[in-house]
Amino acid sequence: MKKNSYLLAAIFVLCLPAAYAYPPAVGILGTAKDCLSCHLNNGPWQEEANTIIDILDKETQKSLKQADGSFSLEFHPGETRTFLTVIGRVKGDDKAPPYRNAWLYIDPQTIGGSALSKFPPGWEVNLPMACRLVGDKIALYEGAQVTVLPMSIRPGGTAKDAELALQVMLTQGDAVKGKAKEGMIGNYFERKVKLKILK
């Protein structure tokens, strides 16, 4: 009887329809490398000059952006730090702002692996991905149309210096379930994020 129950459960799972997820399915449910595996890069916000993509230290509110456009996040061993991901468009932008922003911090080397976490091995994180409506406020970008959300990261005992890709989509409209390239416009951006453990 028990063996028959397992057999029926296995048949049920195999017969389930394919799952659709948004946001974001990059590397989580499959082997997609970035958002453009499903979505179009067809929005009006493609120019970098008026686009805000920043990571701030939550305590100091200072940007961690480097001269080359990447971000450097430094930790003492075992230290938990909280950062703010800020995404949007500058004050006075002549284009209608995006309605929502989606983002994902991911170690590209983990894509295709079986682990649900796509952060580097040994690192702990509480919110590596999100999709948020535009309308948050922050002093550094006063008057800008942005989303702001905190994320806490901690290097565990086995963590080593690592590099992430921050994948960002600015969007308007709603994607059609199962047809992500319909019903929504958006622009894709990517940034390099370095995790460094101080000696």
Image (cartoon, rainbow, N blue to C red):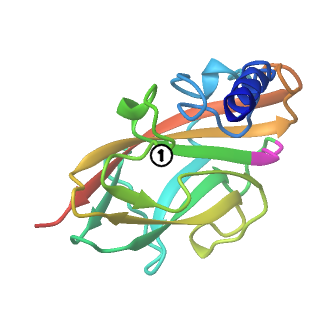
Is any atom of residue 46 visible in this view? no
Quarter of the N terminus within the rendering: top right
Q: Is residue 99 left or right of residue 170?
A: right
Give the residue type at disc 1.
Ser
Q: Is residue 88 above or below residue 141?
A: above
Q: Where in the figure is residue 12, as x and y percent of width and height?
A: 79, 25
Residue 50 image point, x, y percent: 62, 45
Residue 175, by quadrant, is top right
Relative to 67, residue 39 above or below: above
Q: Judge whether residue 86 can be spotted in this image.
A: yes
Q: Residue furthest front?
A: 1
Q: Which residue is mark 1?
A: 117
**Residue 46 relative to residue 95: left or right:** left
- Residue at position x 38%, y 61% in the image: 64
Q: Is residue 73 magenta?
A: no
Q: Is residue 37 above or below residue 199?
A: above
* Label 1 residue SS: loop
Image coords of residue 46 (percent x, y): 64, 31
> Is 99 included in the stretch rendered in magenta?
yes
Q: Quadrant of residue 78?
A: bottom left
Q: Which residue is at the front of the view, 115 or 9?
A: 9
Range of residues picked out in magenta: 96-100
Q: Which residue is rendered at x = 34% and y = 56% of the image? A: 123
Q: How many numbered marks appear?
A: 1
Residue 4 position within the rendered picture, expressed as x and y whole percent measured from the top left: 73, 27
Q: Residue at x 45, y 81 (%)?
A: 59
Residue farthest to the left, as pictured:
199
